Amino acid sequence: MRHVYYERLGETVYFETLPNGLELRVVPKPEHAKKYAFFATRYGGMDTRFQLGGRWLDTPAGIAHYLEHKMFDTKEGNALQELAKNGAEPNAFTSNAMTGYYFDSTDHFDENLEILLSFVSIPYFTEESVAKEQGIIAQEIRMIEDNPDWQIYARMLRALYRSHTARTSIAGTVESISHITAETLYDCHKAFYTPSNMILTVVGNVDPVKVADLARRILPQEGGPAVPRDYGDEPEAVAERETRLAMEVSSPQFLAGYKCRPAGEGEDRLRTMILGDLACDLLFGESSPLYQRLYSQGLINSSFGGAFELMPGVAYLYAGGESKEPRAVAGALQEEADRLVREGVDEAFFQRTLRASFGSNLRGLNSFENIAVSLTEGQFGGFDPFRFPQVFDSVTQEDVRNFLRDNVTADRAAISEIVPKEA
């Protein structure tokens, strides 16, 4: 196996691509008893239209999340229960562009890893079990649709994007999941749960060679072809300038979103991630002049915050929280972005923010989960996440100003509001 020692991070990563196309990453931590395995496929909520066997398939919204739920079913019972019997703590998640299955344990690691690789690669569905799951997931959907935080975020995405499937709820709707059948689940598994579309990342007190040998033994020998995907033809302009919904809330809430330019692949993607995070910290982070001013004026409270997000073909920045005057805060946010483009950032504040952001990335290496997810996102995005120190070395204040100039502009903005229902 090839390995790289990252001197500035004090980390060693073992790399291998198995004959079936599976990417393998192992980060040994011999000083720890804990072991963490993360098995992920480049398939998420936005992958609803794809080509399989020469024909395009349109699948229901929410099917990737639905498939994640059903993957734990086995002919023998339930893989979650088997892992728990061995002292493992298993779980899974579905995001817009990824589905991941994972566990951590101190004992029986090899046995647990064998269970993980087996149930994820060998689907077992029946029409009866699929129908039963619909009621469970429908209840989940109704619960999240009653959540103001979810509504304000989902409506912001629908305001920003006209056709890109990033605007589609990961869980789908009660109506959309009613069209999911065992056959459609098998089609999606066949398309995306192939070794060549997946990565296994292991962190902890493990032998990299043993992990690779186990994966070779358990997983299918063939990797499967690449699957074309269609995310929609998205224009640069936002779909809507504003959206408002009345709900049972005590005070107004809002998110101001910006439809940013999509990032490239490779290290450019990592650089864009770092610049986007820095832009957020400098523009509206808790130490920023804007945050301090709005907080002292009573226009925002501790709920205020935001982030920069990247997906395939999509990038967006957003900020918000509770406020009695959402439009005033959104306007102040835009004015501050314009000022930073014109005047730049105080150099001392820029350097403090740069060091704090670098430190946050460095502290992330203390988390086995964060290491595994970062390596997975890097593989899917074509970059090495452990090269972040070199990227930070090259970032300048002018880079951040250019990011704000290109992305945080009035013509790329949309506001999503949740307001109290009138009595």
Image: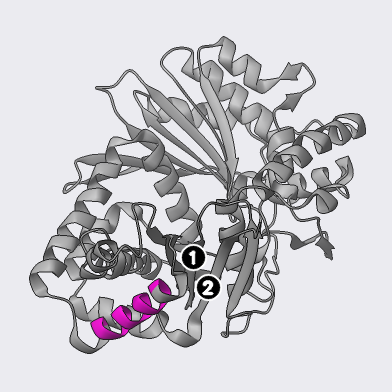
What is the number of callouts on the image? 2
Question: 31 or 396, which is in the foreground?
Answer: 396
Among the 4 quarters of the image, the one containing residue 181: top right
Residue 170 % position (x, y): 66, 52
Residue 191 % position (x, y): 74, 51
In the rendered view, tell whether residue 16 sits above or below residue 75.
below
Asked if residue 118 is among those painted magenta in the image, a careful observer would answer no
For the N terminus, the image quarter is top left
Q: Which mark is residue 255?
A: 1
Q: Amino acid at mark 1?
A: Leu
In the rendered view, tell whether residue 340 sits above or below residue 124.
below
From the viewer's perspective, tell me whether residue 75 is left or right of residue 308.
Answer: right
From the viewer's perspective, tell me whether residue 380 is left or right of residue 371.
Answer: right
> Within 10 Å of the Cα at label 2, are there few (<14), some (14-19), or many (20+) other Cα atoms?
many
Among the 4 quarters of the image, the one containing residue 402: bottom left
Q: Which residues are magenta?
A: 329-340
The scheme the figure's colours follow is: one colour
**Separation of residues labelled 1 and 2 (CA atoms):** 6 Å
Q: Which residue is mark 2?
A: 415
From the viewer's perspective, tell me whether residue 60 is left or right of residue 154.
Answer: right
Asked if residue 333 is among those painted magenta in the image, a careful observer would answer yes
| SS at mark 2 in the image | strand
Residue 389 % position (x, y): 21, 57
> Would you say residue 1 is visible in this rendering?
no
Residue 272 % position (x, y): 36, 69
Circle 1/circle 2 CB separation < 8 Å: yes
x 57%, y 60%: residue: 152
Question: 236 or 416, which is in the foreground?
Answer: 416
Q: Which mark is residue 360?
A: none
Q: Amino acid at mark 2?
A: Ile
